[in-house]
Image (cartoon, rainbow, N blue to C red):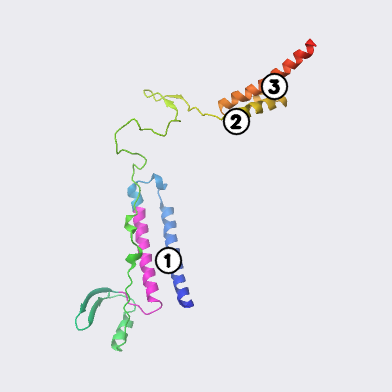
Amino acid sequence: MSKKEQDFRQMTADTVGKDLLGALVQEIRLLPDAWAKMTKAKQDDVIDRLRSRVEDNVRMAVYTIASSNRTVVAGNLDQITIKDGVKAVIKFGMHSQNLEGLYEAASDSKSVLVVVADAGEFTQGINQVAGEDDQRAMDLGHEYNQNDGGGMDGASEVNPDTGEIIGLPHKKFHPEELEEAFNQGYLAAQEGKAQTDCPIMDGELVIEWVRGFKAWHEEQNDENDDKEVA
């Protein structure tokens, strides 16, 4: 591939990329709400507009690269006959660009190059993109069974009649965590801190912290009693 052809294709890719990015930014600016809060119909409207823009840009890129700086007249192949040679009928729009070049080629009996530039092969599956169902967070495809709510063993207990929360989920701590809380309380007492200096943490850890705090003071009281007896 020549340097000129590389530059040409890079320029085409840059132009298409800029236009697609501009389309995305424009759609983001026009979004009426967060994507997850939009209905499927509104999501589909946005996707349809972007789909149309992508198709136009891919088609433009295919045509531009296929033309490769040649004089090009875009048309549709209407008929092709293979009998004692090949005869093709290509229809062009009345306002197609570069028609004058085609007239000139016909009058001067010049050869023309027919290039098949089908953008469809580069947009396969584009129609499969769609918005999310409005009830995407709910599974209504089956009746209630005893497995419903699976994976929620740690959830709070709730009174089924009143909806009142009975209790928060019980969190289990490793023995090392409990021992660490005890040691922190013991050290805090040793440093002369007050019991109110206990840090904010889970209730079970607070209990261990206070136990450690009181354990140090009890040891000090026992030592003082021993000194008085002596």
Mark 3 vs mark 2: in front: 2
Position in image of residue 139 (x %, y %) = 33, 39
Q: Nearer the viewer, residue 147 or 98?
A: 147
Mark toward the start of the polypeptide (3 vs 2) = 2
Kindly state the secondary structure of the residue where label 3 is placed: helix
**Tag 3: Cα neighbours inside 10 Å, few (<14), some, or many (≥20)?**
some
Name the mark on residue 117: none
| Residue at the spot of label 2 | 176
Is residue 3 in sight in this rendering? yes
| Residue at the spot of label 3 | 216
Name the mark on residue 16: 1
Position in image of residue 155 (x %, y %) = 44, 30
Amino acid at dot 1 = Val
Is residue 197 in sight in this rendering? no
- Look at the image and tell me in which quarter the C terminus lies: top right
Q: Tell me what residue is drawn at x 47 percent, y 74 percent.
A: 6
**Tag 2: Cα neighbours inside 10 Å, few (<14), some, or many (≥20)?**
few
Amino acid at dot 2 = Glu
Question: Does the magenta segment cover residue 102?
Answer: no
As measured in the structure, the alpha-carbon distance from the residue carrying label 3 to the one carrying label 1 is 74 Å
